[in-house]
Amino acid sequence: MNTIVTSKQEILKQSRSILQTKGYRSISIRAIAQACHVSIGSIYNYFKSKTDLISETIESVWLEIFHPSN
């Protein structure tokens, strides 16, 4: 039984990290799941599709750029 729990924020954090270090084309559900140490299905609990994941990843990057936390 998989007892590792992740959050949407952790998934987005890992997705942003992959985006920044390896580029847009390297973002995949499999890579994100591996980085979070969860199953692929766990990612789909938070995102309907890879497109949704990428959209929210890009949105979070834009928010970080234009609305940084102080």
Image (cartoon, rainbow, N blue to C red):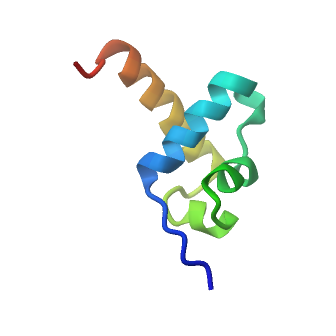
Tell me where residue 36 appears, x and y as whole percent: 60, 54
37 vs 58, nearest the viewer: 37
Residue shown at 65%/48% (left/top)?
50
Can I make out residue 23 in this image? Answer: no
Q: Quarter of the image holding residue 22?
A: top right
Can I make out residue 35 in this image? Answer: yes
Describe residue 31's horizontal placement relative to residue 43 as left or right.
right
Q: Does residue 44 sit above or below 19 in this rendering?
A: below
Q: Which residue lies furthest to the top in this view?
A: 66
Tell me where residue 58 appears, x and y as whole percent: 52, 28
Residue shown at 55%/58% (left/top)?
48
Residue shown at 61%/78% (left/top)?
2
Q: Residue furthest left?
A: 70
State the quadrant of the C terminus: top left
Tell me where residue 44 appears, x and y as whole percent: 58, 63
Tell me where residue 53 appears, x and y as whole percent: 56, 45
Residue shown at 58%/60% (left/top)?
43
State the quadrant of the N terminus: bottom right
Q: Quarter of the image holding residue 37?
A: bottom right
Q: Does residue 45 sit above or below 8 in this rendering?
A: below
